Structures are given as structure tokens and as C-alpha cells.
Image (tube, grey):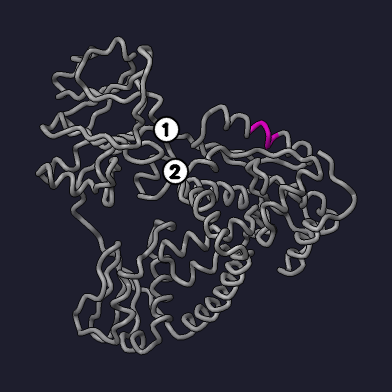
Amino acid sequence: MRLTGKKDNLEVKVESFFLDYGIKAARGILLGLSGGSDSVGLASILCKLSDKLNISIACAYLDHGIREEEERKREGEFVKKLANELGVELYTGRVKPEEIVLLSKREGRSLEEIARKERYSFFYRVLDEHSFDYLALGHTLDDQIETVIMRFFQGSSSFGLSGIPPVRGKIIRPLIFCSKQEIIDYLQKNQIGYLTDSSNLEPVFLRNRIRLELIPVVERIFPGFRSVIQSFAEKMTFANDFIKREARAKLTWEKTDRGFRMPAVEFFNLPPVLRLYSLYELYDLSTEKKTARLPYRFLRPVIIESSFKEGQTVLKNFGIHLFVRGKYLFWEKDVVANKKKSYLIVAHVNNKYKIDKEITLHIRNVTLSSYKGSNPWLFEDEIVFPLVIRSRMPGDNIIFDWGKKSLKKLFNDWKVTPELRQLIPVLEDRRGILAVLGEFWGFQNRFSSLIEKKERRKDSSLIVFSFFKNRECRSGDRG
């Protein structure tokens, strides 16, 4: 590592960020470090500017366990070495690989979102335990562009289209106005090494697909799209700040034992955009799933209508109940009492798992040449681990050569009873659903086109899935 004495343009931008946003001197800053170019660049710049800005720096690193063990080990060693070279303290944490997968399935969110949630939780713990003033993150202008594009196509509100805020509470993002290429150029110029995250090149993640597939197409048609989106996000921020101030001044929700209430006439007399913002804010206050989104199509009736009758349910879904009683509009949690049984297993080879009180699944490893049985199997190298075995979930689709089909339609075609729908196993890896194993229950085994069709050697490794009634299950296997 060689940091030159002459100030670089990137350093000027970071210094200006601190001045423009009034980040005071003599403050402790915790920096989220990953080993990638963005966080390494930010760590290097902040350490170089620490005397001038009168700030103290420490770093935090979390191994969230969703990559190969060798890559994670290399990353951990790299960040320790970097922190030592920079002369800063490093706080480290680790999450077991299966925990991220389990949380992802349980909450119905992507691996990216859950890993991000765990990373932020770790950073905040360190921030609070050691009394740092700010958490500095290495988000760049490229991240901002990708976020706005992704939220647009996900149907985000104007609040989401303002993108990633440069400063929010204790979080600061000094590189948010700098491109990734600027950072890489800075690192190369100063001979500072960094790591490339292999998962950034995997098209299984939505953000990666936007970066690798969508943005190159947009750039060919609109070469200047980055500055346009940056300006658009900034204008959305101005508009949203105004909406927030107006909504908080004109909508006063009163806390109740079961939620919130306000006079119905006051609510419905306000402009639709203020009503919309108010409902989003209430949802954020009342939901435990901070990554959850409330669809606009669900809220639309209460936005376009100007009144509702006494006793009428206005909205009921997504865990909320909005209704009119007397002169008040009430917002309460919708408690669903009747929950269907389901299961989710992060599977390991050569293990047995109880699917319910009557059925056990045995997963074992054999070679192609030695296997003579009739149970369903996959080639081991077809699976992008971790492998999850679970009951079906709303919105599940399996991809075939001719297109995709919802599991709901598949089960309807098979005439599967409601009880069995939660029992038939779905096999899923990091890319998506690999198979639906219905044969044990008298249906079919259907395999996804994600599974490659190619010639194999006789010593190729198979993963075999055998189902047993529990009284039949033993250490051996029927085939």
C-alpha cells in the first residue's frame, strides 16, 4: 500500500462531503469493511484525512456465511491485514451459513436482503457498545443508480425512488457521489489491494442482474443515463421531504391498545399523496419485518376513495386491518390465528430429517456407478449449495424448458389435497427451485430446467432423496 502525499480528487470529494453535511470534528467513526474496492477505498481515504478532519476511525467486518469457506477465510485474513496496515481497530463477527438461509425462507425475503439486515444489526451493535458517533458505509454512485432502477421496476413509491440517502441518522455514505471506477482508479494509483466478491458476478441475485444485464443495454441507448437518474433521485428527495413535513403536520394518529386511530373525516379530506405517505409510515411503525413492502395496489382503494361507511373494512391483508368505527379510522394488526403447518430444512448430505411426525427423509451420497435404486436424485455438482428442503410458499414457481409454472397450478393439475400441499417437498438451492418431489405421495417428481443435461462420468457423485414412513426408517436404505 502506498498513499501519496498529494491530495487526490476523490479525497477532495470525501472531504467536501464531511463539510457539506456538517459532520463535526473529533467524532468516532465506525466503518463497515468488506474487503471490496468500495470499503477499502473509503477506509484508506478516511485514514489519510483523519488528522485534517479530526476524526478517529475503527472498522467492523461481518462474515455472513453465504459464500464458500475458502473465500470467506481469505476475506477475513485480508481485512485483518488491512486494518493492521491502516493502524485501526477491527471488530469482527460471524453468522452461520444456515442461519441466513433459514431467515430468508422464514421471512420470505432474498438472501441479499437478509444478509444486509444481519450486517446492519452487527454494525449497530458495535456502534452502540463502543459509543461511535457515525457508521460510514461504502455505497457509491453506482449503487445509487442500481437501487433507483431496481426500485422503479419493483413498483416503489416516490419515497423509494429517492434512492440511498447520503446521511440518515448515524449512517453516513461519503462515497455516494463517487463512481466505482473513480474508486478503483484511486486504489490502483495508490497501489492498494482489494478483493472481488465472487457473488457479485452471480446472476442469481437481482442487483447483479441489473448491473450485468440491464444497465449495459440502457447505457447503449441512453449513454448519459447515470447523471439523469442521479438528478431524478435528488428531485425525488426534495419532493419527499416536503411530503413528510406536510403529512406529519396534518395527520395526527393517536396510539390505542391495538394500534392507531384518527378522525376519519380529517384523513379522507387530505390529498391522496399525504394519505399514502401516512399509511407507509404506520406500516413501518407496526410491522416487525423492517424489509417488508406494502404494495400500492393494496393501498389504492383508500387513496382514491374520499370516504367509507361506518363499520366498513377499508383494508385487510398483509397483517393489517384498517376500518371505520364511529367517527374514527382505526389501524390495527390483523392477527391470523389459523396457521398452516410448514417446514424448512437446510439439508446436509448423509443425514435424516423428519418432515412430519410420520415421514422421514434420508439424504445420502453415492456414486453414479454404484446406485441401483429408484429414488429421486441429483448430481452433486448441479447444486449451488446450501440446499434447502421445504414446504411450498406463496408465489413459488418452477422453471421448465418451455417456461415457468406456479406450484399452485402444478398442485391443482395433480389434484393435491390442501393437507398434502404443505407436505410435498420442494428442493431449492441459491438459484431457485430445483425439483418438486411428489412421487412418494402418489404424484410425480418434476425437475427444473436449472438442472443441466450433460454427460457424466461413472464416478460422478449423486445426492439421493429417500422417503420413509417412520416405522420403516432404518440405518439402511431400500434403494
Residue at the extreme front: 221
Q: Which mark is residue 204?
A: 2
Mark 1 and mark 2 in contact (Cβ < 8 Å)? yes
As displayed, is residue 282 above or below residue 318?
A: below
Q: Position of residue 196 (x, y in %)?
A: 62, 39
Asked if residue 234 lies left or right of residue 286, the reply is right
Within 10 Å of disc 1 (Cα), the crowding (few <14, some 14-19, many 20+) is few
Identify the residue at image location x=18%, y=53%.
Answer: 338
Residue 185 in the image: x percent, y percent? Answer: 75, 48
Left of 20 or right of it: where is 228? left
For disc 2, the neighbor class at 10 Å (few under 14, some 14 to 19, many from 20) is few
Task: Name the residue at 49% across, 67% down.
Answer: 160
- The reply to whether residue 353 is visible in this rendering is yes
Secondary structure, mark 1, is loop
**Which of disc 1 and disc 2 is earlier in sequence?**
2
Distance CA(mark 2)–CA(mark 1): 10 Å
Q: Secondary structure at mark 2?
A: loop
Main SS, magenta residues: helix
Is residue 169 visible to the viewer in this orientation of the structure? Answer: no
Number of numbered discs present? 2
- Residue under the image location 28 percent in, 77 percent down: 301
The disc placed on residue 283 is none
Q: Residue drawn 44% across and 43% down?
A: 204
Would residue 105 be counted in the magenta stretch?
Answer: no
Q: Which residues, given as a range, are shown in magenta?
A: 76-80
- Residue at the disc numbered 1: 384
The kind of residue on which mark 1 rests is Val
Residue flagged by tag 2: what amino acid is it? Val
Would residue 475 appear left or right of 167 to someone viewing this image? left
Q: Quadrant of the C terminus?
A: top left
